[in-house]
Amino acid sequence: MATHKLLLLAGDGIGPEVMAEVKHVIGFLDKQGIASFAIEEDLVGGSAYDAHGVAISDAAMERAKAADAILLGAVGGPKWANVPYEARPEAGLLRLRKDLGLFANLRPALCYPALADASSLKREVVEGLDILIVRELTGGVYFGEPKTILDLGNGQRRAIDTQVYDTYEIDRIGRVAFELARTRRNKVTSSEKHNVMRSGVLWKETITALHAKDYKDVELEHQLADSLAMQLVRWPKQFDVIVTDNLFGDILSDIASMLTGSLGMLPSASLGALDEATGKRPAMYEPVHGSAPDIAGRGIANPIAMIGSLGMALRYSFGLGEVADKIEEAIAAVLASGKRTGDIRTPGGPVIGTADMGAAIVEELGKLIA
Ligand code: NAD
Ligand code: IPM
Ligand code: MN
């Protein structure tokens, strides 16, 4: 059996708490002989800053490049509010994405049947929901230059962020979206703001041309990003795959998370280009949520987004889609049994902590796999 090299970067806040539960799932899969992992661990974010004065060390970057896949918990928190901008925790995450070329961020939002009442929206709006946001992750306003604050010398300062997209960046993320749509309900909604942004014009033109050239069999529609945000809460089941830029994708995926019940439910995969020579694709898997400083250290965070991210690693990096299915089934069964962390609690219902939720999922997985 192949041994998969997995680098765990737990990070800050609830990162290490939810990562501890993933380790139990990994340990279980290893023990059962379902998959074999060689695990390494390192620091990222505020914890790396505290140890090394940078948000990710060069040594950790080397480990990340050598790994078959990375699992990342979360970075950031108020403790590092005043560190130099270049060394802020989030810079570690952004360096990983950029230096590994992880341009395609897949953020599925799935409403588990048992959680249809945990959403802030009505049951009929979210029940059976299964959408996939494909977020461009290495371009746009996150990385465009110039990116600076200028002192204008008259008591004023000027902040500049630059949205930049080249055709090839839009084309390759578009391909990912169309290919994935073919494996789902065959529909892509592309989103930008071509009415105010030149990058939106190029985005729409490029996606339209790509569709006409290679993906005529897939249904394509365009929605302006502001209107799409509204449609996501009005009637989200109209969507299958949504493809959008780095910033819109960040915001729209947080909106989508509440359709599923909680930000604590959403996993994600960040994928790079396939290396034809090695057959490998750089990949990092992380929850959509952050370090949740408001609940960190209390053992009450929901580990499902993190465990779901391991599921995505099994599916996209290790060719173990059927094991990923079992993990999803185990999560569904645990939720169906009424077990809830605080973020998805049924009003007045009992609540369990991070460790008990992790243990319940491992136990259920045992029943499904044994
Ligand atoms: P957040 O996602 O950390 O938290 C938003 C809200 O959701 C909080 O009320 C939190 O308690 C809740 N929440 C999030 N995950 C949860 C979970 N698993 N279980 C239960 N509740 C959960 O967003 P924020 O508070 O705006 O950001 C905090 C820090 O995290 C910031 O420094 C931000 O930059 C960083 N951040 C990091 C990542 C990442 O590492 N991938 C993602 C988003 C935000
Ligand atoms: C996310 C986060 C990150 C982003 C931050 C922490 C840099 O919000 O992964 O969604 O904005 O991409
Ligand atoms: Mn975000």
Image (cartoon, rainbow, N blue to C red):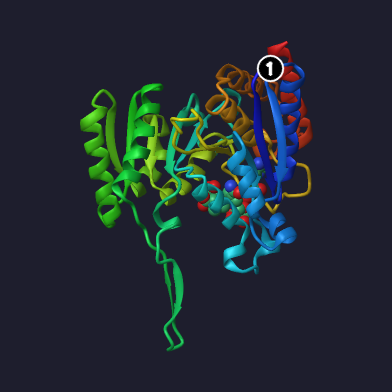
Q: Position of residue 256 (x, y in %)?
A: 49, 39
In front of the other: 165 or 367: 165
Q: In which quadrant is the N terminus drawn? A: top right
Q: Residue at x 64, y 47 (%)?
A: 74
Q: Residue under label 1, please give it.
A: 34
The answer to whether any part of residue 169 appears in the image is: yes
Q: Residue at x 44, y 43 (%)?
A: 103
Q: What kind of residue is marked 1?
A: Ile
* Side of 122 where 196 appears, left or right: left
Secondary structure under tag 1 reads: loop
* Side of 179 where 31 appears, left or right: right
Q: Position of residue 58 (x, y in %)?
A: 63, 54
Q: Position of residue 83 (x, y in %)?
A: 65, 68
Does the numbered disc 1 mark a residue whose Cβ is under 8 Å from ligand 1?
no
* Side of 195 where 24 appears, left or right: right
Q: Position of residue 293 (x, y in %)?
A: 69, 53
Q: Residue at x 31, y 50 (%)?
A: 166
Q: In which quadrant is the C terminus drawn? A: top right
The answer to whether any part of residue 122 appears in the image is: no
Q: Is residue 307 above or below residue 194?
A: above
Residue situated furthest top in the rendering:
370
In the picture, residue 314 is in which quadrant? top right
